[in-house]
Image (cartoon, rainbow, N blue to C red):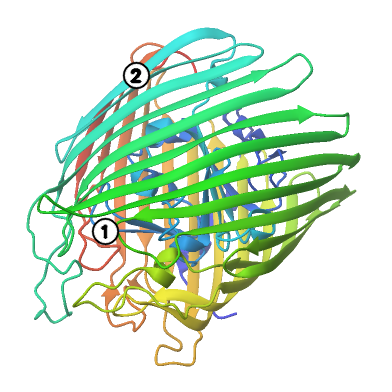
Amino acid sequence: MQFRTWPAFAAILGVSSAWGAPPTAATTDLSDVVVTATRTPQSSADTLAATTVITRADIERSQARSLAELLGDTPSLSIANSGGPGKATSIHLRGTDANQVLVLVDGVRWGSATNGQAAIQDFPVSQIQRIEIVRGPRSSLYGADAVGGVIQIFTRDGKGAKGRGPTPYFSVTGGSYNTWKGEGGVSGATKRLHYNLSVSGETTGGFNACTGRPFSSPRGGAGCYANQPDHDGYHREDGSANLGYRFDNGWSVGAHYLRSNGDAQYDGATTNRSYTVQEVYGVRIDAPLTDFWDSRLSLSRSRDRSKNYFKGDYVSRFDTRRDSVNWQNDFVLAKQQTATLGVDHRQDEVTSSAVYKQNKRNNTGVFGEYQGRFGAHEIDVAARDDDNQAYGNHATGSVTYGYHVNKTYTLTASYGNAFNAPTFNDLYYPDTPGFPPASNPDLKPEKSHTGEIGFKATPGWGHWAIHAYQTDINDEITLNANYTPENVSSARIRGVEGEATAYLGRWRIGANADWLNAENRGSGANHGNDLPRRPNYSASLHVDRDLFARFSAGASAKLVGSRYNDLANTDKLGGYALFGLRGEMRVTEAWKVQAKLSNLFDRHYQTVDFYNQPGRAAYVTVSYSPGNT
């Protein structure tokens, strides 16, 4: 394989692998249980998949203000944002497109049925308990969308408050761009019951989202087709509830609800303000039917709604709904051998002011998985068949092999395929007079094949991992220079990624790096070009230290390489480096004050051509949280 080289990648991994220190209490997070990689519980140290876990402690330590900021330090994950908080934000995981990444919230498929993307800009960080990011194809377990990987968000559930009655918590944040944020909630847990109820809100005055250069500029037309020099603010109110109860016989029931109301101002020629609603809710029953058979049934719904305006006048509305029924059965076949069988049924429906030629479709998927370990050898085999009302049957599968060299080191190899169907917008969105076509009814579903090798370790000082992969995508759907979707006959994505975390006394050091070659392999004029908005390398470093009994401080650095904004590779976005500082003072066991300084050197950069990103910004947070809630 030929890669763009970057010496700092090797330097970071070299430093990481050289770290050595006695284990500390902080390393206990290595035993965190993850469920996304295999749809069954296993420790993060044991999973064969390339997996990153972000805990509630990580969220509070980073003082991240958005979900995109949290995810942005994941290896091989890049963010494209159109002008700041609350503006359209896309995820590229291992070089795949935004609608090729499956996002789950408490096990529920979340995202718009029209554009195929999850509105991560509207998800409240304050409602998150933990995040699991699995890199690599997972269509053999989850069906369409899981080409680049799966991101699962778990909302706060109160389990950390076990042994305590109702416990309140709250925080207030203020800072740059006239930003204010508040949250409050109550949680509790007993031997059988756990619960959490919380609300939050945020408002920011923002900044000018789009540069609005005129059409006569040397780089072409304005990215937002408008010149509206103003501050584009964002407001959001959120709430969530989570409840679970376990009976004497081991059966358990649970329910969860999340809602986020957003009000985003932006720059545009046809719309420049949107009111949005994101909802995810569901119920579940977990039943240990026998000593070897566990069964789970869940019913859920996610909704993505928006009303769009231009200079105060109503323009359009969109309401997409996804209803799901999931039945999963896990069987213990023998010691260290399990099997899973299940079925997922989903109906997507679109109601909008735009008249789609089709507004409803169903999908039923049947899947199975076998996991087994035989001495030092471990294998995971999965297969799935999806019957889509619009596109017929699609079969996917994967096989992963692991060789445990010893208790510390593990070698892995995997192969899997995936598919991704065109969205309602791709195929049937009505055209706007005077603009290029917005949809393409001749699009084909995307299909991919991925091979991967990996090497990971869990030494006493922490953990590290490195993976190399290649993904070949046929008929990939991307936007051309006129923003009309089209099939690239093929695309090849090659990459290498590494991450390491070390706990050295009072120090906690985390580093990751990746480089990427996402190439258009089609036979047209763009053959050999980079796929748009994928940086060719990135790296980040986070260093935190407990200074005294009640003080801690941290610093971060992020380096992102250049990328092209378009298929033709004519508009190049420069690379950039960002630095930040943060600190915390714990006044009492329950009260603490935090401060954060982002973009320390006030670097100007863009992740989407023409759209601005925040400059230097400072924020202060005062919070009350008795115990781990």
Question: Which label was assigned to residue 246?
Answer: none
The foreground one among 182 and 510 is: 182
Q: Amino acid at mark 2?
A: Phe
- For the point 47% across and 53% down, the residue is 349
The foreground one among 629 and 537 is: 629
Question: Which label was assigned to residue 170?
Answer: 2
- For the point 22% across and 77% down, the residue is 435
Q: Quadrant of residue 411?
A: bottom right
Residue that protrudes farthest toward the top in the picture: 165
Q: Position of residue 66 (x, y in %)?
A: 35, 42
The residue tagged 1 is 82
Question: As drawn, is 84 to the left or to the right of 243?
Answer: left
Considering only vertical position in the picture, is 585 above or below 526? above
Question: As drawn, is 463 to the left or to the right of 341?
Answer: left
In the structure shown, which secondary structural element does the residue marked by tag 2 occupy? Answer: strand
Q: Quadrant of residue 469?
A: bottom right
- For the point 37% across and 62% down, the residue is 560
From mark 2 to mark 1, how far is it between C-alphas? Answer: 31 Å
Q: Position of residue 476 (x, y in %)?
A: 50, 76
Q: Position of residue 502 (x, y in %)?
A: 55, 41
